Structures are given as C-alpha cells and as structure tokens.
Image (cartoon, helix red, strand yellow):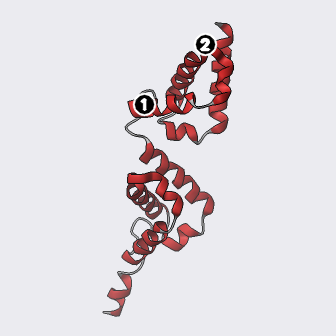
Amino acid sequence: MVLLATSCNTSTKGNWSDADKKKFREEMSKVEELSNFGENKSKWIECYLSKCEASYSSFAAAGSDETGVKKIVKECTIEVMANGSVKGNWSEADKENFRQKMLSVDALSVFGESKLEWIECFLSKCEENYSCMAEADQDEKGVEKLALECNDYIDEM
C-alpha cells in the first residue's frame, strides 16, 4: 500500500505528479509579468507546464535548467501570441498591431512620404520570415537586418 501511495506522487519525464503540477501552477500564479498575456495567461501557463512536463522529470528538474526553460518560455509566448498567424500569412490582428506599432516609431519620420511604404515593406519581410509578430519581436538582430533591406528598397525608389 505504501509503495502504491508513493508511486502516485512521483514525477517522471512526461508524467509529473499532481503535486508537482499544483506547485508549478502556484509558482506561475505569482509571476506578475504574466499579466501581460491578459486573457491568454492561463493558456500560456498550460503551454509552459505541458512543455516542461515533456522535457523534465519533475518541477525541481525544470527549475534547475534556466537556459532550457528560457527556450520554452519563448516557444509558449510565440504559440499563445500568434493570433492565428503562420509564416507567410499573418492574421489581420497581427498585421494591424504591427502597423500601429510601426506608426508610433518617431525615428521612421526620416522616410517622409515613404514611411507607409517602408512599413509595408518591413511587414512583408517579417511576415515571410516569422510565424507571427511575437516571434519577430523576439529576434532583434533578425528584424534589424530586414529593416535595413527596406531602407535599401526606399533608397532605390
């Protein structure tokens, strides 16, 4: 009987105990930054839990691999924030969010009347290279390169 009771509370990779899952969710509920996900907070936590459970033998094991869990954080952020976007075909919500974000960048005023064309060039390049705006937001060097390609495009006009 004791062996059966203790085996139910043992976590393994791909099958964490209820106690580890509960501890994970409790810890995540304390992370203030997750409020940035708004209504997607629970969805993000469940994504993160699922990926940690699949990758680590326990809650403690996940907590000891800072590099690995950072990768999972990025994966879940992209998955949850994709808004139905896929590489080459972003959702209208992602496109509109992208345009609004770019319109608020004061530095783009250097393009004058070509500002909107530059934004559309940049959007097109980001859409071709990333599965969603959230993924593009996480690759500063990559989007910088794409922005420079649009600078060249505007210069050639």
Viewer-proximal residue, 25 or 8? 25
Q: Eyeballing the image, is 102 above or below 81?
A: above
Q: Secondary structure at mark 1?
A: loop
Q: Which mark is residue 113?
A: 2
Q: Eyeballing the image, is 157 above or below 92?
A: above
Residue found at x 60% / y 13%: 113
Within-10-Å neighbours for mark 2: few <14, some 14–19, many 20+: few
Q: Is residue 47 left or right of residue 99?
A: left
Q: Position of residue 118 (x, y in %)?
A: 59, 19
Q: Secondary structure at mark 2?
A: helix
Q: Residue furthest top?
A: 157
Q: Quadrant of the N terminus?
A: bottom left
Viewer-proximal residue, 154 or 57? 154
- Count the marks: 2
Within-10-Å neighbours for mark 1: few <14, some 14–19, many 20+: many
Residue found at x 64% / y 6%: 157
Residue that carries the numbered disc 1 in the rendered image: 90
Counting residues from the start of the chain, the first of labels 1 and 2 encountered is 1
Q: Residue furthest left?
A: 1
Q: Is residue 87 visible?
A: no
Viewer-proximal residue, 52 or 141? 141
Q: Select label 1 or label 2 by which is in front.
A: 2
Viewer-proximal residue, 48 or 155? 155
Q: Position of residue 107 (x, y in %)?
A: 68, 28
For badge 1, the amino acid type reads Trp
Question: Which quadrant would residue 104 be assigned to in this image?
Answer: top right
For badge 2, the amino acid type reads Glu
Q: Eyeballing the image, is 98 above or below 45?
A: above
Instruction: Give the distance between the C-alpha atoms of the residues marked 1 and 2, in whole angstroms.
Output: 26 Å
Residue found at x 53% / y 58%: 33
Residue found at x 61% / y 39%: 139
Q: Which mark is residue 145?
A: none
